[in-house]
Image (cartoon, grey):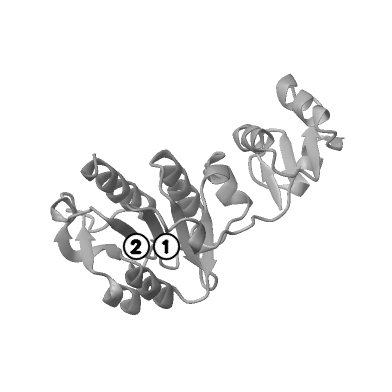
Amino acid sequence: MYVYGKNVVQEIIKSNKKIQEAYIYKNFNDKNIIKSLKNRNIKINWLEKYELDKVVKENHQGIILKVPDYKYFDIDDFINKEESLIVILDHLEDPHNLGAIIRTCEAASVDGIIIPKDRSVSVNATVMKVSSGALENVKIAQVTNLVNTIKELKNKGFWIIGADMDGTDFEKIDYQGKIALVIGNEGKGLSRLVRKECDFIASIPMYGKINSLNASVAAGIIIYKTKTARR
């Protein structure tokens, strides 16, 4: 997998994640990054900008790293705290939304994220770029069956709170205990079977003419509501 951009590269270097090789614009001027790569004996390929553009078509800021694919965690790695807070993403499709949610989860010290293996965005270069390095500090698990996973979480003492329309005002919900927040698909919201398993549906009031928020914005609001309710 290729990752790119100064912020992501700096976080990967700091994390000591394995780097297979680097592709750098020949006039790249961040001496600290170059020094760090050389100190780790990473192979550096000095390229023209058009050559870098062939590797990654998005804004790479003159530096691209080749790294192993993201290694997913097991859900047991992050569900055992007394007041665990995890986020479940119900078939999210946009990598920019996933990256933004990862960044919010890192900032709020969420214990982990669960995503389904099929019909869902997975961790890729765009996600890593948008998360601005936060991915290195967030545990993500992929599961085969989201509904079965939610049932398992309920058996382990989790309250399942779905974010969707036509529910209870999110300000009036009790966020104490082990909580799993479920964020739905960008266009369809929560799937029928997932919504059926939720203990509560949290709705964010709309005061304008639109009737819903971007998935990553809704996630951020409810994640921080949960954190502040626990102070």
Examine the image and state in which quarter residue 196 appears. Answer: bottom left
Is 203 left, or right, of 36 in this rendering?
left
Graded by Cα atoms within 10 Å as few (under 14), some (14 to 19) or many (20 or more), the crowding at tag 1 reads many
Which residue is labeled 1 in the image?
89
User: Which residue is painted at 77% across and 26% down in the image?
Assistant: 34
Residue at 33%, 79% in the rendered image? 193
Which label was assigned to residue 46? none
Q: Residue at x 39, y 53 (%)?
A: 81
Residue 125 lies left or right of residue 213; in this view the side is right
Quadrant containing the C terminus is top left
* Image position, residue 7 (x, y; %): 60, 33
Q: Which mark is residue 182?
A: 2
Label 2 to label 1: alpha-carbon separation: 6 Å
In the picture shown, does residue 112 fall above or below 160? above
- For label 1, the SS is strand
Q: Nearer the viewer, residue 203 or 182?
A: 182
